């Protein structure tokens, strides 16, 4: 990995990126991105918020300091952008039917998903993207494979990537059916504390004044974060999943009235990534609580976390109360 985060633009120019570690606040957004970088099985992240809240800055900065999901010779991950006017063929790729018929061989022309393999697929203003294209993206993200079928001819290739969608809610929302399929969802806002807003401005001015020196001052912090993520990727498969953990996840989903079983699976993947990030092979209640806050709010029929002042102490009670889980288990056993 390079000493200073850069994106190469042609052979003659390198753009110095704002360091990930220099971003002030936005804890949930940064955590959600890091967890997906550890475990793409989480299913991506939707970042909703105001303009100018470091959404794209965070995505690009994190990609620049991390190696690809799987070793492919590249030095760092790439951010592959998907334009909102992209067609399905441009996204998934196309099969040259004329070549197949005349030559008797498959000829596949790769799309954006092929380029995104092992990298980050970034969709700004994803709420303005065609719903069918969003469905295609989410299917590929969930399966890790992109399959193209045309006139009885099919072609498949690996498509393991981290899907990051950003949007400004003022410009329209995303359908609930699609929202549910994003692993994590976070809301970002401008800082409301004067001192933090001042720090945002100070750091930005320092970066604009001397990008090389500013980036170098955060090089060590970014390097340590990258090493932690790489170690967590290796440790992830060793994180144990016990019946106690599964009971707690089930209890949270039941108590918070979410539909289907996708929330449980995503919560488990998220909790495992949190444990691995903290160099543990066992999931604890803190992992589950953080996972619940990232996984469940956008899947609830009502959004009590924000709109009705949901009392998170009740979640802690659920996690700590063995009596509650025993009663849930009894009900499950009686089914």
Image (tube, rainbow, N blue to C red):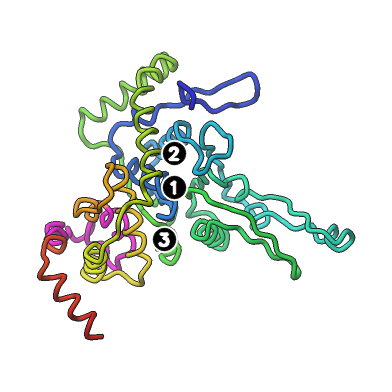
Q: Which quarter of the rendered picture does the C terminus lie within?
A: bottom left
Q: Classify mark 2: helix, strand or loop.
A: helix
Q: Position of residue 104 (x, y in %)?
A: 85, 62
Q: Is residue 182 above or below residue 279?
A: below
Q: Residue at x 57, y 63 (%)?
A: 132
Circles 3 and 1: CB atoms closer than 8 Å? no
**Would residue 49 be seen by someone viewing this image from the given angle?**
no
- Marked residue nearer the N-terminal end (2 or 1): 2
**Label number found at residue 179:** 3
What secondary structure prevails in the magenta region? helix
Circles 2 and 1: CB atoms closer than 8 Å? yes
Q: Which residue is mark 1?
A: 166
Residue 5 falls within the magenta-colored stretch: no
Q: Position of residue 265 (x, y in %)?
A: 36, 63
Q: Classify mark 1: helix, strand or loop.
A: strand
Q: Is residue 248 above or below residue 9?
A: below
Q: Classify mark 3: helix, strand or loop.
A: helix
Q: Residue at x 39, y 33 (%)?
A: 226
- Where residue 312 sits, quadrant-wise, is bottom left
**Would residue 92 be seen by someone viewing this image from the given angle?**
yes
- Marked residue nearer the N-terminal end (3 or 1): 1
Q: Is residue 129 above or below residue 24?
A: below
Which region is colored magenta? 291-316
Q: Which residue is mark 2?
A: 59
Q: Residue at x 63, y 53 (%)?
A: 91
Q: Residue at x 76, y 69 (%)?
A: 151
Q: Nearer the viewer, mark 2 or mark 1?
A: 2
């Amino acid at each position: 990995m390079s000493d200073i985060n850069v994106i190469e633009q042609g052979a003659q120019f390198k753009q110095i990126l704002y360091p990930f570690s220099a971003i002030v606040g936005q804890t949930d957004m940064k955590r959600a991105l890091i967890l997906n970088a550890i475990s793409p099985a989480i299913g991506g992240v939707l970042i909703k918020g105001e303009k100018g809240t470091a959404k794209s800055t965070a995505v690009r900065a994190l990609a620049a300091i991390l190696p690809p999901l799987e070793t492919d010779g590249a030095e760092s991950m790439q951010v592959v952008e998907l334009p909102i006017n992209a067609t399905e063929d441009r996204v998934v790729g196309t099969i040259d039917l004329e070549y197949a018929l005349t030559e008797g061989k498959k000829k596949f022309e790769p799309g954006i998903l092929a380029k995104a393999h092992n990298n980050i697929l970034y969709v700004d203003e994803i709420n303005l993207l065609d719903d069918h294209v969003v469905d295609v993206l989410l299917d590929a993200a969930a399966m890790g494979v992109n399959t193209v079928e045309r006139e009885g001819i099919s072609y498949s290739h690996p498509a393991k990537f981290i899907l990051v969608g950003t949007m400004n809610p003022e410009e329209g929302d995303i359908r609930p059916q699609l929202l549910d399929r994003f692993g994590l969802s976070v809301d970002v806002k401008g800082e409301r504390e004067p001192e933090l807003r001042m720090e945002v401005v100070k750091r930005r001015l320092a970066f604009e004044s001397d990008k090389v020196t500013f980036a170098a001052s955060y090089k060590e912090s970014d390097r340590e974060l990258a090493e932690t993520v790489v170690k967590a990727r290796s440790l992830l498969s060793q994180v144990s999943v016990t019946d106690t953990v599964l009971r707690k996840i089930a209890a949270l989903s039941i108590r918070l009235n979410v539909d289907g079983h996708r929330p449980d699976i995503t919560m488990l993947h998220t909790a495992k990534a949190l444990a691995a990030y903290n160099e543990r092979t066992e999931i604890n209640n803190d992992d589950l609580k953080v996972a619940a806050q990232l996984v469940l709010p956008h899947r609830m029929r009502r959004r009590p976390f924000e709109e009705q002042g949901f009392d998170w102490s009740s979640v802690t009670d659920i996690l700590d109360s063995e009596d509650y889980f025993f009663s849930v288990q009894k009900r499950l056993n009686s089914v």
